Amino acid sequence: MSDVMIRAENVSMTFRTRTGELGAVEDFSLQVDRGEVVCIVGASGCGKSTLLNMVAGFLRPTAGRILLEGKEITAVEPRCGMIFQNYALFPWMTVRGNVAFGPRLRGLSKKECNRKAQHWIERVGLQGFEQAYPGELSGGMQQRVALCRALANEPEVLLCDEPFAALDAMTRQIMQQELLRIVQDSAKTVLFITHSIDEALILSDRLVVMSARPGRVKAVYNNDLPRPRKLDVQLTDRFLKLKRQVWDLVQEEVMGAMVLPVNTT
Amino acid sequence: MRDKELELWRLIVFGAIGLVGFIGLWELVVRLGFIDPFFLPAPSQVVQRMQQLAVGPDAVLWRDIRVSAIRVLTGFFLSILVGVPCGLIMGVNPVIRAALNPIISIIRPLPALSWIPLSMLWLGIDEQQKYAIVFMGCFASVLVYTTDATMGVDPTLTLAARNLGATRMQVLRYVVLPGALPNILSGLKVVLAIAWTCVISAEMVGANSGLGFRIWTAKEWSDTGQVLVGMLSISLTVLLLDILFRGVERLLVPWRKGGSAA
């Protein structure tokens, strides 16, 4: 049976700026089922981060609504754990402190918090670094900590805002593998934003291509690459064929976006 | 880009050469009679005078240092106690910030000296008056440094904490305060030096103890040696407090080993 986790209904978001109104997202509708991994691909500035911020409850749509398990999201939503591109770790907390932060907020005992933290720290292979501060870790390790921190809070949904964009190509592949493993194990619902078609194809069950700003759904692909997947899936013919299809479409949008004034999302 | 830093031992050696050279030159010009010791006593004479004031039956120096330091620290901590929470709230709340900013802009440029007449009228020349002068001289700066530090905290960190389920109070306690702490502490270091200028001014105008008083009375008696002893004592005490403060900083901000800005 299909069990709807997130449902965006005709969502629009308009920002007021000095030069007038700026439509970031327009009439965007999408449904994500429980346990599904949906990747949203689009050019820079197409409003994909804005969309994610609305699902997290950081922003309220100017029109339409977003439902989580059938209820409208009206405030910051801890059931949707966010992974930020710049990690957003608390620099004054150790790795353990960061990971245990969510459980601590919920008033769990110190012992219980540490147990939960330790579980996830070991799960992503960070044991031995519990007492390190984020500033002492590499980018890849910091993003592991961020992943840990989100997971230790036991969210229903993982929201990923280009989490691997700042990593070098090698580390990025390792992190994709890591995320693939965790997602496949835990059957988490994931909404993942990226501008990398490869990344989207490796990770997703479904792939949504967004148009240039204001962001709309341009196309949806069912990614039928077999699961469980490993990174070598990107060497298969089926992968390349899908990539070609998506690429043609995205290229059109990238070209379209390039003539627009460049702006940050 | 900063110029290349010297290694530690070179820093110490060159620093020592500079210091010894300066003192030696000073001693020389006084000894050779270029300067009348009445106007500027030689370093050796200053040290001698310091000995007289520091040891012996009527040693007043330690008491003066203690009295001044207590005044400074009391006023300084009072200004932290009020200024830091207010600054945090101003930093996170744009409405309160907008409402209070004009008032602070009026108070902040006032030198501590200008508060002396009013404070004497209200509080006499007791200790409270000294605390009040230091407080008035520090408070606005503490507030502004804290507000700026608070506004400088990465907003993504606040979002991350909210996303993990933190309430607004929890964000303030667990994210904004520790996030702003390094810059608050750097600000407080500057304010601590301001506090000393406040207390010395206050003591020169109306007091019967403290380093400021000691310097002022020495001038009345044309005891330039004692004036210089008082000035030197201020320098040394401030230096010592600064070192202590750095220790506290290291204790409170252990994640910043390099001391670089985030």
Image (cartoon, coloured by chain):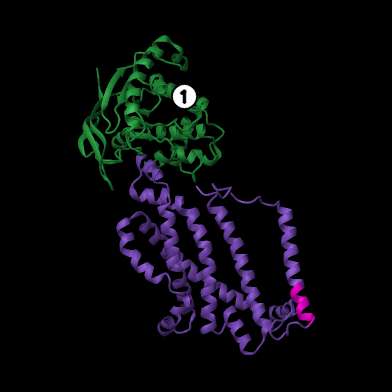
Instruction: Say which element carries label 1.
Output: helix
Q: Is residue B81 above or below residue A203?
A: below
Type of amino acid under label 1: Glu
Residue A218 spot, x, y in % from top left: 27, 24
The number of numbered discs placed on residues in the rendered structure image is 1
- Residue appearing at x 66%, y 79% in the figure: B228
Question: Is residue B27 magenta-colored?
Answer: yes
The magenta-colored residue range is: B25-32
Residue A38 spot, x, y in % from top left: 33, 24
Q: Residue beneath label 1, please?
A: A178
- Residue appearing at x 54%, y 46% in the figure: B255
Q: State which chain disc 1 sits on.
A: A
Residue B210 appears anywhere in the view: no
Outermost top residue: A237
Outermost front residue: A259
- Residue appearing at x 43%, y 11% in the figure: A236
Residue B20 appears anywhere in the view: yes
- Residue appearing at x 33%, y 55% in the figure: B93
Outermost bottom residue: B221
Q: Residues within 10 Å of mark 1 (few under 14, many from 20)?
A: some
Q: Is residue B140 left or right of residue A216?
A: right
Colour chain A appears in: green
Please identify the quarter of the rendering in which residue B26 is found.
bottom right
- Frontmost residue, A87 versus A243: A243
Question: Is residue A84 magenta-colored?
Answer: no
Chain in purple colour: B
Query: Dominant secondary structure of the magenta stretch?
Result: helix
Q: Is residue B240 above or below residue A172?
A: below
